[in-house]
Image (cartoon, helix red, strand yellow):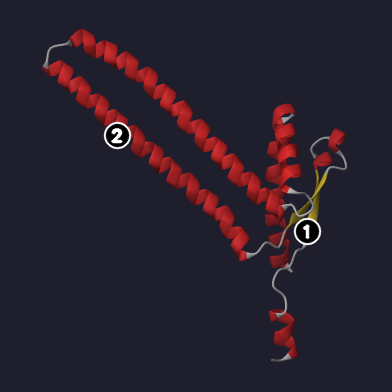
Amino acid sequence: MSDKLQRITGVDTVQETVAVDLGDYHESYRGATFAVWVTPTKAHKKRWHDIDDWVAQASEETKAALAKLDRQHQAQVAELRREGQTARVLELEKQYQIERGAFDERAAAKMQETLDEKVLLWLADTVLDWSLDEFRTARDHLIEHNPDAWEWLWNRITSTIGEYKKQQLKN
């Protein structure tokens, strides 16, 4: 194997990082820095795309479950109308709207909780100088006390990777 080829094949992962300082969001956080891995592997990038795929699949599954509920409800309403129970149809409709709203809220909350965890795990693997537990604690604190700071941080982490890539491609 040539020295040139050895130079390439001898490197598995390049862990170039760029510091992101939460103090850029607000001065009170100055010094809370994050070493963002801006040269992620193909596998790490795939994990991000897998999150997008999961969102699409979960949305489709929720839509299918709602469609099934709607069909069952419509069948019940049709049966009551055939039986001439108009008053019962109105009662059933009111009850169904309540159940449907509760289903929507539960489905959205469960989906958001799972998405938040998947994003957290990916981000924690992207920020190389924080442990998962520390990163989770920081996220939870920010969400509780300054949710916009958390949103700013995870957007800055992902945009830092994109900016680095654009800069490297220009060179």
Residue tagged 1 = 17
Q: Quadrant of the C terminus?
A: bottom right
In this image, 115 relative to 160: left or right?
left
* 10 Å crowding of disc 1: few (<14), some (14-19), many (20+): many
Q: Secondary structure at mark 2?
A: helix
Q: Nearer the viewer, residue 58 or 21?
A: 58
Q: Secondary structure at mark 1?
A: strand
Tell me, yes or no, if residue 33 can be seen here. Answer: yes
Of the numbered discs 1 and 2, the one sitting upstream in the chain is: 1
Distance of label 1 from label 2 (alpha carbons): 48 Å
* 10 Å crowding of disc 2: few (<14), some (14-19), many (20+): few
Name which residue lies at 33% across and 19% down.
96
State the mark number for residue 68: 2
Q: Quadrant of the N terminus?
A: bottom right
In the rendering, at what x and y percent does residue 110 appear?
51, 34
In the rendering, at what x and y percent does residue 135 appear?
74, 43
Res 21 → quadrant: top right
In this image, 106 relative to 74: left or right?
right
Would you place residue 21 above or below residue 142 in this image?
below
In the rendering, at what x and y percent does residue 28 appear?
86, 33
State the mark number for residue 70: none
Name which residue lies at 35% across and 32% down.
66
Question: Which is in the foreground here, disc 1 or disc 2?
Answer: 2
In the rendering, at what x and y percent does residue 98 appear?
39, 18
Would you place residue 124 above or below residue 113 in this image?
below
Name which residue lies at 29% across and 16% down.
93
Q: Nearer the viewer, residue 78 or 162?
A: 78
Amino acid on which the number 2 mark rests in the picture: Lys
Q: Nearer the viewer, residue 52 or 112?
A: 112
